[in-house]
Amino acid sequence: MRSSTRTRVVAGWLLSCVVALGAPAQALAGAAKAEDGWIATWGAAPVSEGAPLEAGSIRQVVRTSIGGSAVRIRLSNLFGDAPLTLGPVRVAKAADGSAIVEGSGQAVTFDGKPTLTLARGASALSDPVALPVGALERIAVSLYLPQGAKRPTIHGAASQDAFFAPDEATAATAFPAGEPEDRRYFLTDVEVAAAAGARAIVALGDSITDGVGSTQNGDARWPDLLARRLQADPALADIAVVNSGIAGNRIVNDGAAPYRGPSSLSRLDRDVLDKPGVRWVLLLQGGNDISASDVLAAPEQKVSAQQIIDGMKTLIARAHARGLKIWGATLLPRANTEFPAPPTPAALAKREQVNAWIRDSGAFDAVVDFDKVMRDPAHPDRLLPAFDSGDHLHPNDAGYKAMAEAIDLTLFDAGK
C-alpha cells in the first residue's frame, strides 16, 4: 500500500426520518436534498499533501459526536496535483484495531456510482448510506485507491491510527498486520441524518485543539470530551462537536514549516462556516502566530499582537455575518516549552496582550478562559504540571478533560 519512499511522521505534526436499508442510492440522495436534517458529526481539516501512496486500501476510524439514521462522508483531493480515482468505499461499525463488526458494512456511492474521480482541488459528498449510528459511536471508513495517489490530501497529527492493505480489502473484517500511521487520508467530514433541532459547534484551532499529547486512539482531545459532556445532558445531547484544529496552524499566515496548513482566515469557510448545522464556533488560536515570530526569519512571517487581534476581529465578523455565535478562548501558558523554540520575552508579552484583549474587549460572544484553568498558580506563565503531556506546551488527557469541563454549558442556551 505504502510507497517505499514514504517516511512515517509522528504526531506533532435524510434524512430526518429513518432510511430504509434497501432504498436505492439515487432515492436516498433525492430525499437528502429535500430534507434539512444533515448535521456535521465529525471532521478533520485537510492540511497538506502527503507522501505518495501505491494502489491499495486504507481504513480509518472516526467517532461520531451525535448519531443519526444515516451517514454520508466527504472525500477531498484538495492538495492533489492530478485527478484522483477512489472506490470502492465502505462504512461499517468499528471493532478493535483495524477490525469492523462483521455484517455491518455498507457500500458508499457517489451520484449512485461505487467509484468517483475527483478533479485536482475538488471534494465530493457521498450519497446517504443506510447505516444508523449512535452518539459517540466508532465507525470505520474503508476506501480503495486503484491507481494509488501521487499527492494524497492528508490531515497530520490525527491521534488515531490509519490502517493499510495492499489490495482491495474494503469489505475485509480486519486488515493484515502492519504499521499504522497517525494521519487522515482524503476523509474530511462525516455527517448524519439527525433528529430535528440538532446543531453543531466547530472548534477552530491548532495542535491543542487537534489533540496533540492525548492518548493515541483514545478520543481524548478536548472537543471529544466536550462531546461526552453534551451527551450526558439530555437537553444538550443533540449538539454535535466538530474538530477543525490543525497542528501547527496559524490565524494570519499559511503554512511555512514547521507551521502547517492554510491559515484560519483562508480556510474558515470550508472548515467551519460551511459545516451543516453549525451554530457556534470556539476559537483557540494565536499561539503559533506568536511563536513563528521567534522561529521564522522572513519578515512577513513575523506578526504583532495587534495583527493577531485584527485576524480574530475578521474571523468574528465573518462568523457573525453567517448568523453564528463565536466564543474566544484564551491562549495557554507556554513559558518553559522548548518546542518549536523557547519563547522570547517578546513572545510572552504578546500572549498576555492577546489574552487581555480576548477577555476584555467584548468582541467575542463569550470567553472561555483556558489560560486560567490550565496555568500553574505558582508559575502563571507555565502549564500546570498535572496537565502537562511532557513538552510543557500540549496538555495530557487530564489537561484536555479540564479544558472540556471549563466550558460553561449554559452558553448553549438560546440567545447565548
Image (spheres, rainbow, N blue to C red):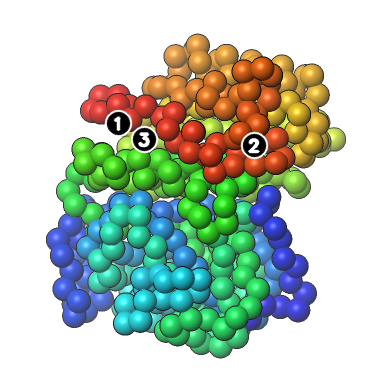
Residue type pointed to by label 3: Trp
Residue that sits furthest to the front in the current view = 386
* Sequence-earlier tag: 3 or 2: 3
- Which amino acid type corresponds to the residue marked 2 in the rendered image? Asp
Residue 325 located left or right of residue 53: left
Q: Residue at x 32, y 27 (%)?
A: 411
Q: The C terminus appears in which quarter of the rendering?
A: top left
Which residue is under mark 1?
412
Label at residue 262: none
Residue 78 in view in this figure: no
Instruction: Residue under label 3, please give it.
Output: 280
Q: Quadrant of residue 345?
A: top right
User: Where residue 126 sits: x, y (%)?
Assistant: 36, 68
Q: Nearer the viewer, residue 57 or 230?
A: 230
Give the mark, 1 or 2, whose residue is nearer the N terminus: 2
Q: Nearer the viewer, residue 135 or 44?
A: 135
State which quarter of the image contains the N terminus: bottom right
Q: For the point 61% across and 33% down, which residue is it?
A: 386
Does 108 sit above or below residue 297? below
Q: In the rendered image, which quarter is residue 121 located in?
A: bottom right
| Few, some or many residues within 10 Å of mark 3 (<14, 14–19, 20+) | many
Q: Is 36 placed above or below 359 here?
A: below
Query: In the drawing, does residue 106 fall left or right of residue 212?
Result: left
Do residues under tags 3 and 1 come within 8 Å of each other at their CB atoms? yes
Q: Residue furthest bottom?
A: 167
Q: Position of residue 89 (x, y in %)?
A: 43, 77
Q: CA distance from mark 1 to mark 2?
A: 29 Å
Q: Amino acid at mark 1?
A: Phe
- Could you say whether the residue bearing mark 1 is in a helix, strand or loop? helix
Crowdedness near tag 2: few (<14), some (14–19) or many (≥20) residues, C-alpha within 10 Å = many
- In the image as oriented, which residue stretches furthest toward the right? 297
The residue indicated by pointer 2 is: 388
